[in-house]
């Protein structure tokens, strides 16, 4: 009987901790919320997409398996045009997702502006992988 009571007590505590964590995380503004979804002037890649494509190294695994397609990523661009974070929205696999993340992280953007002031903006970019 004591074992059953201990298990019930342990489950109750675990449930309380889980619910407390969920409640706290919902009341805390997420890091993503600091970035605007739209701005009067959206960030622009310095050098444009051709410059970004030049930096991409086709992953070996993707080449060996003839993997082609697009990777859709969200870049979190700060007020200075640096990429703080990259989230892959729709990946391709074979190392392509990681390559897009790497290249976007080292890329420079012309910062987004809203009402004449530089702002943090998230922007979506698609990168096509095609074996030549």
Image: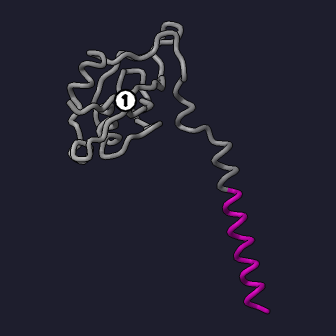
Question: Which residue sits at x=35%, y=26%?
Answer: 82
- Residue 51 picture location, percent across and down: 24, 20
Range covered by the magenta-colored residues: 1-20
Depth check, front residue: 90 or 82: 90
Left or right: 110 in relation to 121? left
Q: Quadrant of the N terminus?
A: bottom right
Relative vertical location of residue 30 with respect to residue 6 in this rendering, above or below:
above
Q: Residue 10 appears at what percent x and percent y? A: 70, 76
Residue 12 drawn in magenta = yes
* 16 to the left or right of 34: right
Question: What percent of the width, then of the height, locates residue 73?
Answer: 42, 32
Q: Is residue 2 magenta?
A: yes
Secondary structure category for the residue under label 1: strand
| Depth order, front residue of 71/6 | 71
Q: Residue 77 appears in which quarter of the rendering?
A: top left
* Location of residue 54 in the rendering, given as x and y in whole percent from the top left corner: 20, 25
Main SS of residues in magenta: helix
Mark 1 = which residue? 83
In the rendered image of this protein, does residue 127 appear above or below residue 116? below
Residue at figure coordinates x 52%, y 10% from the top left: 40
């Amino acid at each position: 009987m004591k074992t059953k009571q201990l298990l019930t007590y342990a489950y109750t505590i675990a449930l309380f901790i889980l619910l407390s964590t969920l409640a706290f995380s919902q009341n805390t503004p997420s890091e993503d919320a600091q970035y605007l979804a739209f701005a009067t002037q959206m960030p622009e890649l310095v050098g444009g997409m051709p410059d970004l494509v030049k930096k991409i190294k086709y992953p070996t695994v993707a080449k060996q398996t003839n993997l082609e397609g697009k990777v859709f990523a969200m870049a979190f661009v700060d007020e200075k045009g640096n990429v703080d974070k990259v989230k892959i929205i729709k990946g391709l696999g074979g190392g392509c997702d990681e390559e897009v993340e790497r290249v976007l992280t080292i890329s420079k953007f012309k910062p987004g502006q809203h009402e004449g002031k530089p702002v943090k903006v998230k922007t979506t970019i698609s990168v096509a992988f095609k074996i030549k």
